[in-house]
Amino acid sequence: MRLIFHGAAKEVGRSCIELKTKGDRIILDAGIKFKEHGFEYPEKVLNLPDIDGLFISHAHLDHTGALPMFEHNNITCPIFCTKLTYELTKILLKDSYKIARIRNLHPAYEKIDLKKVAKAVRFIRYDQSYKHRDIRFTFRNAGHIPGSAMMEIEAEGKRLLYTGDIKIKPTELMKGAYTAYNNVDTMIIESTYGNRVLPDKEDLKKRFLDRVEAVVKDRGSVLIPVFSLGRAQLILMILAERRFNVPVYYEGMCHKMNSKMLKVSDDPYIRNRKRLEKMLHKGATHISSPRRRQYALQKPGIFVTTSGMLQGGPVLSYIKELWHSPKNTIMLTGFQCKRTNGRHLYEEGFVYIDGWKTYVKCAVEKFDFSGHADQNELQEFIRQVNPKNLIIQHGDAEEVETLKAWAEKNTKARVYAPRVGDEIEV
Ligand SMILES: [Zn+2]
């Protein structure tokens, strides 16, 4: 079989891998990549007239954002994903389309294409074997976000494992990823943290909560930008572990995600559903309009809001109100892609607000609550799966190269680090 990398090769974003066998042409993930202004699509996929199936690992837009574009170009084939992934993707795609329209970014599809996506979807249950044309496949828990899956694919007598995004250890929100794979010929693995060891979960949680407590005791406000899917719920659950003398608020897309996550009940890999429910109904207040936001901002508070990389969403309206005072703190909670507002803020101390480059006076801190496996987890997982071929993707060049060098030294696998456009025969 042949693998062609249309995106997420020595970069994070626009995940899209083509799997070509003698009879079938399958696409694994169809994402977009966020840039300072707008986004990038996978390369060359529109030159593919006959795709036989689209397999989606999880709902994040860097794995799903290009789905309507396929439909727009009449590339009609079934889309396979878990039910929760579809429900969450639907919310994200709708929102992403709306934002693109408002900001005149001209997405490569129209609203009608979102409906076409809905018709093409086929729900896949975890841990069950399915057959599509000449391909057998099983979805396994990836531990990354609710609904997320790794894919075990059998084609032409070979076994392929595509990890999508993975978290091996359990978090407050998710059970750890499935790891008991056998006889894997080729493993395509993400490497977002291929070069870094993340802090111990309990230590990190304590430092985070202590810091929130200190800021609010000092009459400051805490702004916690989050990704609407996964991180928002995790942060709210962690905040629920302590009592603060100021209210906790949340705003943005995470609200819809929260309700959907609690509603779609057949996801066996979400943890602490009850605790999340309690926090959403009793512990924290949802801000549903700009007027309520203005009202809440008059007093110190803890504000959890989207988007996580400060590329849009209500978070910029909060920064507008909070950046002046050194008493306030912005606490970033995850990976910040290159050339995003979040990365600028963390590394250089400024953000673009309404097009103006603004150097903030409030404190900025980063807490790595990651939904991704860190270097140790990735290495251990690779050792355990012990594939013949190892393909490292979904990481910045440095992360990919570090993991590649390690794998070449410590495993027997033939190791690849493709660039966008590369083809690998396995
Ligand atoms: Zn993801």
Image (cartoon, grey):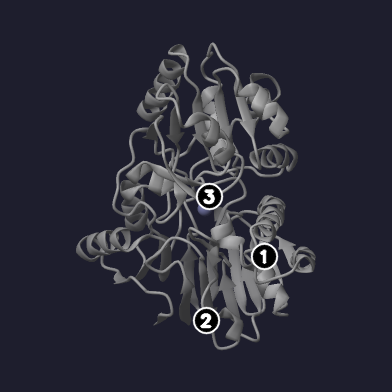
Of tags 1 and 2, the one toward the viewer is 1
Of pointers 2 and 3, the one earlier in the residue sequence:
2
Q: Earlier in the sequence, mark 3 or mark 1?
A: 1
Q: Secondary structure at mark 2?
A: loop
Which of labels 3 and 1 is toward the front? Answer: 3
Q: Nearer the viewer, residue 231 or 318?
A: 318
Tell me the quarter of the picture where residue 186 sits. Answer: bottom left
**Label 2 belongs to which residue?**
156
Q: Amino acid at mark 1?
A: Phe
Q: Is residue 167 visible?
A: no
Q: Which mark is residue 80?
A: 1
Marks 1 and 2, the one that precedes in the sequence:
1
| 3 vs 406: above or below | below
Above or below: residue 218 compared with residue 186? above
Q: Which mark is residue 311?
A: 3
Q: Are marks 1 and 2 in contact (CB under 8 Å)?
A: no
Q: Amino acid at mark 2?
A: Glu
**SS assignment at label 1:** strand
In the rendered view, would you say 177 is above or below 317?
below
For the residue carrying disc 3, how many other residues have a C-alpha within 10 Å: few (<14), some (14-19), or many (20+)? many
- Residue, x 65% and y 85% (percent of image)? 50
Residue 319 lies left or right of residue 421; in this view the side is right
Which residue corresponds to the image point at 51% horizontal and 72% vertical from the top-left?
17
Q: Which part of the image, by quadrant, shows the C terminus?
A: bottom left
Mark toward the viewer: 2 or 3: 3
Residue 294 or residue 191, whichever sits in front = 294
Instruction: Give the image location of residue 291, x and y in percent.
Output: 72, 29
**Under 8 Å from ligand 1: the CB of mark 3?**
no
| Residue neighbourhood size for the residue with mark 2, other residues' Cα within 10 Å, grouped as few (<14), some (14–19), many (≥20) | few
Q: Residues within 10 Å of mark 1 (few under 14, many from 20)?
A: many
> Looking at the image, which residue is at 64% across and 40% down?
254
Residue type, label 3:
Gln
